[in-house]
Image (cartoon, coloured by chain):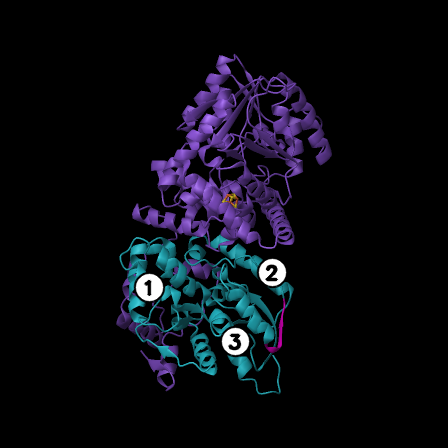
Amino acid sequence: MATCLCDAFYDDVAVATVEVLEHLGLEVGFSEAQTCCGQPAFNGGDWDASRKVVRHTVRTFAGEDPVIVPSGSCAAMLFHGAPLEFEKERDRDEVGQLGRRTWELADFIVNGLGVKTWPGRYEATVAFHCSCHSRGTMSGEAALALLTSIAGTRILPFGEGEQCCGFGGTFSVAFPHVSAAMGELKLEHIRAVSPDVLVSADMSCLMHLGGLAAKEGKPVRTLHVAQVLRDALNYKGASSG
Amino acid sequence: MRFQPLDLFATALPADKRASVYQSTKATHEKRTKLLFEQFADPNRLRQRAGEIKQHAIENLDAYLPAVEKKLQANGVQVHWASTAEVACETVLGIMRARKATKMVKAKTMVSEEIELADFLGRHGIEALETDLGEFIVQIDHDHPSHIVRPIIHKNRREIAQSFEREGLGAYDDDPQVITTRARHFLRQKYLQADVGLTGANFISAESGRMVLVTNEGNSRFCLAATKCHIALIGIEKIVPRDSDLALLINLLGRSGTAQDLTVYTEFISGPKSSEQPDGPEEMHVIFVDNGRTEVLASDCREILRCIRCGACLNVCPVYRQASGHAYRSVYPGPVGAVLSPILMGSRFAEKADLPKASSLCGACHEVCPVNIPIPDLLLRLRHRAKEEGVAAPGTPPMGAWALLASQPMAWRAALFGGKAMDYLPRSLLPIPALHAWEEKRTLPAWRGGEFRKWLKKRPGVKPR
Ligand code: SF4
């Protein structure tokens, strides 16, 4: 599943995800009918609207194949959020079935496929923002393990890594001041270690942090984990960074 | 543009207040995490276990409440039941009047804040003096606690020194040592003059009727040293099945709340003084308070009744750290308050229905909660309830148009490509409604709608499904 953010803004992340999965020898399928995981309405409390979208997603991804999502947040919507809003619905089993075969990309690579190290080379110092939706899942550790294993990549730990970036979907527009203040704090910690690039498994966090930084006139370079993995594979020697 | 009240409150909060709330919550949180992970191989397993115990207890209150009543009565305690705040206050007043008592010393208890006991007694000519230092300062300032464990987290020592000077407790001196000594001197005589000592309880065991009180200042002990009557105000959710459950819960409470292995004082009280004991209250009353708790129990958010009021979720919460406690307009602030406060409003739920939205749903609260309460799930359920009940809120736009698009692939694809071709943003497509609010603080990335799908078409390896 490409996610609506990649569909609308971050096509290269979706491209990188396909390339990474193909590198692992998998055959990638893409359903043209896919839209969104249903999270925006779910978080907003409009569960009727959200369930409508989830039902569409369940139909679109019917079958047994694992569903790989380059977003911890959208993946968690499918394996945690959707079952919550379907608790009392008659089609909750179908929703649960999709949830059980939905994976966040890094989690899938490390814990689904058992691939724990990544080949190639990527020369950069990386600040890795562990997105909140990976709490209680194996995604954060998985992404970090893969990034750490890449030759040339150095992870720079920064302060209060467990804190949220402040995005939170509708929260970011309903509580713009608190949201932005949270993002500023995160950026402060990240800038303190001067990484070449800020990496996360969720484009939503990066859209928020990158957008804040750009608005301030002090842009931060951001990449999705999938892009780093793909770029490592494409390393041709010579230049760095 | 209208903003949520909590967001506005946070914006107006003076920078030094925000900084001190942030610094001290952060320090406690970090120390808590270090302690737990250094001392236990798997603290998360402990949190789960504690959550199971408390969940079992609240789901079987119908059995445990009569059991604890019997035990308490056998221990010589008079048991009272208060369905509402009014009944609880009246019960306390009744006990005071029966003893012709006019002076009470109080230990810190959140449930007394909840029922506004001190004000009520004051209106009836009874002095109910707070003896916890923080609560004492809140009381002399006619303020409200802003944190459930550290009531004056929003005050600095200069403000406290000014309050002491104003109250005639000595000339201005903001040395913390001086402040505590002065409070101690003042409170000492009050302990001796009071007829009744009132406390809460952190836990009460159904097996023995034994209640547990934890404090760091020892003030609850003083409250019960010279007074002849002890009143304990206890929320019905404080029950645990067995004495042995206390071991786990007490171990988690100190570490989670104040990053201590154990609070300085941990008292176990099972009744009034026995004939062999030299002193202590001769009369003891336990008032079990419902005040909306059975309503919580009947709701789909009953897990919040497991809460042991440790404050860890406040300490870790990025929103609490920005906004401080008063932003929640409730006795219970932070993540626990965002769940509990609106439900405790009963039929006036709408007045606090904005609180469950004041969260990025980051889940840090769930991760630290010693009784493993899935707070984000509960916040989501309350958001759903607000929507069902038609509570309007600024900044949360309707999702109908988006849902329509997102469940119709043709329309979705048309919007994706159309936006690109005609160089506009199909607003109803995005997971970030209210784009103007977004763009006030952040830039938007360039619109690339449909680009990925175009790329796929040229890629034979990817199978259409
Ligand atoms: S909800 Fe959990 S973390 Fe928050 S105060 Fe209660 S017990 Fe502590």
Is-magenta flag for residue B193? no
> What letter labels the chain drawn in cyan?
A
Residue A17, placed above or below residue B178: below
Seen from the viewer's position, the closer of residues B337 and B1 is: B337
Seen from the viewer's position, the closer of residues A171 and B172 is: A171
The numbered disc on residue A188 is 2
Seen from the viewer's position, the closer of residues A231 and A80 is: A80
Give the residue pinned by disc 3. Answer: A115
The numbered disc on residue B428 is 1
Chain ID of residue with mark 2: A
Q: Which residues are magenta?
A: A150-156
Chain ID of residue with mark 3: A
Disc 3, SS: loop
Disc 2, SS: helix
Q: CA distance from mark 2 to mark 1?
A: 33 Å
In the picture provided, is B383 more to the left or to the right than B194?
left
Q: CA distance from mark 1 to mark 3?
A: 39 Å
Measuring 55% from the left and 39% from the top, which residue is drawn there? B244
Chain ID of residue with mark 1: B
Q: Is residue B124 visible?
A: no
- Ligand 1 within 8 A of label 3's CB? no
Q: Amino acid at mark 3?
A: Val
Residue B342, placed above or below residue B130: below
Q: Nearer the viewer, mark 1 or mark 3?
A: 3
Disc 3 with disc 2 on a shared chain: yes
In the rendered picture, chain B carries what hue?
purple
Quarter of the image with the C terminus of chain B is bottom left
Disc 1, SS: helix
Q: CA distance from mark 3 to mark 2?
A: 34 Å
**Residue density around tag 1, few if under 14, some if 14–19, many if 20 or more, within 10 Å:** some
